[in-house]
Image (cartoon, rainbow, N blue to C red):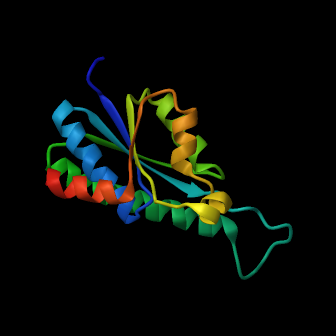
């Protein structure tokens, strides 16, 4: 197996995803790989009747721009560590499929993703992005449990 040249780290700005990013950044540095920071903004359903109080397009645009800004801040901090980064913000109802689409489109070699530790009815109702990415992805996926990702990030620092 050849070393990874492109690593994708999905970011939802939660603590587990930030811990997974730390692990992905460490791997990118070790392999001299490009690190892709990807956030998926949920698609806002369009209202049947126009509303003067809620303008879904403006809200969606604001979410997208906030994600772009947050990812750029992360990328700038990683660049200071000598890590090559790319950022991408997707918009979709199905975050897992959007992550897989972005990975395939950009020939990603590895996805490093955290679980959020949901179980029981939470997982049933909300589903698992990580689980679906593992099932559908054509590239290897490194899954970090929320607690393990945090512990690993502390030891690699």
- The answer to whether residue 71 is visible is yes
Query: Whole-percent x and y of residue 46?
Result: 76, 63
At x 66%, y 58%, the residue is: 124
Q: Nearer the viewer, residue 16 or 35?
A: 16
Quadrant in which the N terminus appears: top left
**Quarter assignment of residue 151:** bottom left
Q: Residue at x 85, y 67 (%)?
A: 48
The quadrant of the image that shows the C terminus is bottom left
Which residue is painted at 54% across and 45% down in the image?
131
Residue at the top extreme of this rendering: 1
- In percent of width and height, residue 97 lies at 60, 41
Q: Position of residue 112 (x, y in %)?
A: 37, 42
Q: Is residue 98 visible?
A: no
In this rendering, the count of numbered labels is 0
Q: Is residue 51 left or right of residue 5?
A: right
Examine the rendered structure and indicate whether residue 54 appears above or below residue 136: below
Q: Is residue 69 shown left or right of residue 47?
A: left
């Amino acid at each position: 197996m050849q070393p990874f040249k492109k690593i994708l780290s999905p970011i939802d700005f939660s603590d587990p995803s930030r811990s997974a990013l730390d692990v992905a950044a460490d791997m990118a540095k070790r392999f001299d790989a490009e690190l892709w920071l990807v956030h998926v903004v949920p698609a806002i359903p369009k209202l049947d009747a126009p509303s003067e109080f809620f303008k879904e397009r403006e809200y969606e645009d604001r979410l997208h721009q906030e994600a772009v800004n947050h990812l750029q801040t992360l990328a700038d901090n990683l660049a200071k560590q000598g890590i090559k980064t790319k950022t991408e913000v997707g918009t979709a109802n199905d975050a897992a499929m959007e992550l897989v689409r972005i990975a395939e489109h950009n020939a990603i070699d590895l996805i490093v993703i955290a679980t959020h530790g949901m179980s029981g009815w939470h997982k049933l109702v909300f589903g698992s992005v990580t689980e679906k990415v593992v099932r559908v992805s054509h590239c290897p996926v490194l899954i970090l449990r929320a607690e393990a990702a945090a512990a690993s990030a502390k030891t690699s620092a």
